Structure formats: structure tokens, C-alpha cells
Amino acid sequence: MTDAANSIFQQTVIMFIIVIIGALCYKFRLINDEGKKQLSNLVLYVVNPLLIFMSYQTEMREDLLMGLLWTTIMAALTYTAFILASKIIIRDKEKREAAVERFSMIYSNFGFMGTPLIFGVFGNDGVFMMNGFVTVSNLFIWTHGISMMSGGNHDGKKGGMPIVKALTTPAVIAVAAGLICLFTGIRIPEPVSTALDHVAEMTTPLAMIVAGASIMSAGIIKSIKNPKIYLITAIRLIAFPVLGFILIAFLPCADMPKMITLIEFSCPVATIGTMFAIKYDRDPEYASQIFAVSTLVSAATLPLIVKLGTMALEVLHTI
């Protein structure tokens, strides 16, 4: 697992070099706000789901299925803990920015940042196991998350997004289609599978270019002057990952699903939080600033958290 920690560091450096390229593209108007939105949609609706789907184009193995089951369980456990903790930390829920702060604490950028990292370190096996976390994350975001950001009033109706919406996000559809192929033995023939693999491998560069453009558009100089943002960032990138790791460290499963889950909930603030803030008038500028700062700071915290998690698991094995 030490190699995994070193790989995370190298992969993080690679990703942030691409983030810088994305920021420069926005700075010099090679990408504008409309282009950023289009690239974001391309990643969310095509490239990332294809990466998830293609991870199921493999032989069915017991270790993969158990890893998938455990990441599902660990995601549900940690999200429940994060939601409860956020209510204790942010008590004044009537403030306009309170929902943004809670959402930023709870939900990580598991798709844009987590998926490329998992793929870069653990390959398709890691993406396969990660899909349990992805499915649970989408269920929580499109039910609890949207209810919190909308104030319980979604599109003029009380309550959160219907569960059917959570189950029809591109990532969850990709998981469902992948599972069907896995259990039925359906395999995508050549040359189609190679073409789909090529598109799926675009996840990291496209996602990081969008992240870089988003950081530049958020007004990073203004962001770094707000001390409250650093508190939210510290909770998202340090306090909650530590809390989450404590909850999963002693579970009776292999280290790989634990490390995948740790990486996923140690990522910076979810980009979809800014989209929800725009839709429900929850201070989108503040949301984008938290996203920008947390994404930059995660370049240091993510490898550190993974390294500490790896060391902790090695110590637990000796007890």
C-alpha cells in the first residue's frame, strides 16, 4: 500500500499540472464560460460514465464483487456521519450560505477528482470497486443534498428530488448497464471496445482542464482572502477524512476498498454544489470560491491523507 500512496502523490501532481493548463486556457480565453460548461457536460454525461461502464468489461471475480459491496457500505456509513457532523458544526441553517457550507463539507468531488485518481492508481479494478461509492454518492446528493440546498422546496414542491432522479444520473445508469453486462457475460466487441476505452481515458485531462478553468473563473485572489473558506476547506479535506477513516479502518474487508473510499471522500468540494447554488440562489460566488480554494489545497492534503491512511492500515495489520 506504500506504493499506492506514492502513486497518489505522482497522480496528484500530474492532475494539477493539467489544472494549471486549464486555468491558463481560461485566462487567455481559449476556453470561455460557455466552453467550460460544454466540457463539463461532456465529462459528466459521456466520458466519465463510459469509464465506469468499461470497468465492468472484465471477468467476474469474487474480490471485485466484495470490494464493490464494501465501498457501498462504507459510503453509506461515512455520508451519514458527515451529515450529522455538519449539522453540529453549522447550526444556523437559516443563513443563506449555511446550506453551501454544509454541502461543501459533506460532498466531495468524487467524479471529477476521485475517478481519475482511482483509475490512475488502481486501474479498472479500482474503478469497478469505486462504483459502489459513486452510486451511494449520487443517491445522497440527489435526495439529501438537493433538499438541503433547495430548502426542502424543489421546483415548487416540498421535499427533495424524487429517488428516480437519483437513479437516472449518468453515473448510476453506467453502473447498472455495467452490472448487466458483467452478470450476463456481454462483452463489447472490437473495435468498438477500443474506441470506448479511448474516450474513457479522456476523463483525467478533460476533468482537470474544467477544474482549472473553474478555479480561474471563481476569482481566486478574492477567495484566498476569506478566512471562513479555510475553515470549511480544513473540515472537508482533513477533519472529515479523518472521521471517515476512523469509521472504516476496523471493518473486516481488504485494504484496497478502504483506500478507494478514503481517496473518494478526501477529494475537494464537489463541483455540483456550485450548480445547485446557482439554481436555488444559495450564494453561487461563495460556493465557487470554496470549490477553488479546496481544489488547490487538496494538492497537498490528498497525498498526505492517503499516506497517513496507508501507514495506519499497516500498523493495524501488526496488532
Image (spheres, rainbow, N blue to C red):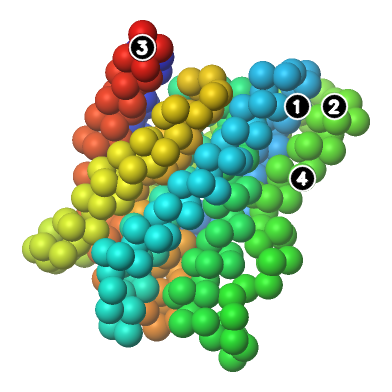
Name the mark nearer the viewer: 2 or 4.
4
- Closer-to-camera residue (19/164): 164
Q: Amino acid at mark 4?
A: Ala
Q: Within 10 Å of the Cα at label 1, are there few (<14), some (14-19), or many (20+) other Cα atoms?
A: some
Read off the residue under disc 2. 187
- Estimate the x, y position of residue 267 in percent, counting from the top left: 37, 43
Question: Quick one: label 1 or label 3, which is nearer the N terminus?
Answer: 1
Label 1 to label 3: alpha-carbon separation: 38 Å
Q: Residues within 10 Å of mark 2 (few under 14, many from 20)?
A: some
Q: Amino acid at mark 3?
A: Ile
Q: Quadrant of the N terminus?
A: top left
For the residues marked 2 and 3, what is the alpha-carbon distance in whole angstroms?
43 Å
Residue, disc 4:
176
Q: Secondary structure at mark 1?
A: loop
Residue 219 lies, with reference to residue 266, above or below; the image says: below
Give the quadrant of the C terminus. Answer: top left
Q: Which mark is residue 57?
A: 1
Residue 52 position by quadrant? top right
Picture layout, residue 21 above or below residue 307: below
User: Which numbered tag is attached to residue 319?
Assistant: 3
Mark 2 and mark 1 in contact? Answer it, CB < 8 Å. Answer: yes
